[in-house]
Amino acid sequence: MPVDIYANKKSSTGTKTRVPDVSPFSGMCPLCIEDCPVLCEIGLSAIRGREVVYPVPDYFGKSTAASNKDYGLDWSHFNIHAELRGARGIAEDSDVAIFPNVSVETKIGGIPLKVPFLVAALGSTAVAKRNWDSLAIGTAISGTIMTIGENVVGMDPEAKFDANGKVIDTVDLKYRVEKYREFWDGKYGEIIVQTNVEDQRLGVDIYA
């Protein structure tokens, strides 16, 4: 199985290699020199290890991160070939069998959805908070599920707790729910909360 030859030069951490023809086994320069003028992933992690955790701090809260690992397969390798003739579930009429007349409604856990997908959990990260409004509004209008991710209550500086450490009020969680509800039709889709062990200790499941 091929090794990631780009492992030591990544735009996500601002690292480079001195030469382009790196070793295919390690991703290192064939000659790793003492007075190297550039900083590769190995050098950065050895000197300032925490900075190798991407994204680059300058982009924290203003970016989303993805892997540049090559899995050898991607969605572009698949083609969906539709039937050239005929129609199912609708009249065989080109003026009738048009996109707006197609229903892709479905249900997940008894919740009716206008479209067969949902928005996965967006938790306490800064990038999730910055983009919450547009995502929540779009999801509500689309009639599907929006998921509040983990640790939102735990990271809310305005959250209030009772004597047993259970949440009784939280500004951030309430805002996220209310923003979705503002554009929700009351039928299609829903806003749900994903929790982790810390959330459960704070009683987020019950509070939500």
Image (cartoon, grey):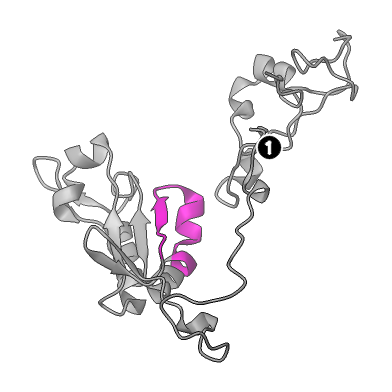
150 relative position to 200: left or right: right
What residue is rendered at 61% in x and 35% in y?
54
What residue is rendered at 40% in x and 48% in y?
124
Q: Residue furthest bottom?
A: 95
Residue under numbered circle 1: 12
- Magenta segment: does it hold 88? no
Q: Decide which of 60, 23 is in the foreground and name it.
A: 23
166 relative position to 179: left or right: left
Residue 11, horizontal then vertical, whole percent:
74, 37
Q: Kindly indicate the quadrant of the structure image that contains residue 139.
A: bottom left
Residue 10, horizontal then vertical, whole percent:
73, 32
Give the vertical position of 4 relative to 156 (above or below): above
What residue is rendered at 87% in x and 16% in y?
36
Other-residue count near label 1 (Cα within 10 Å), few / some / many at <14 / 14–19 / ≥20: some
Residue 65, horizontal then vertical, whole percent:
59, 43
Residue 190, horizontal then vertical, whole percent:
29, 66
What residue is rendered at 40% in x and 63% in y?
116
10 relative position to 63: left or right: right
Q: Kindly indicate the quadrant of the structure image that contains residue 1.
A: top right
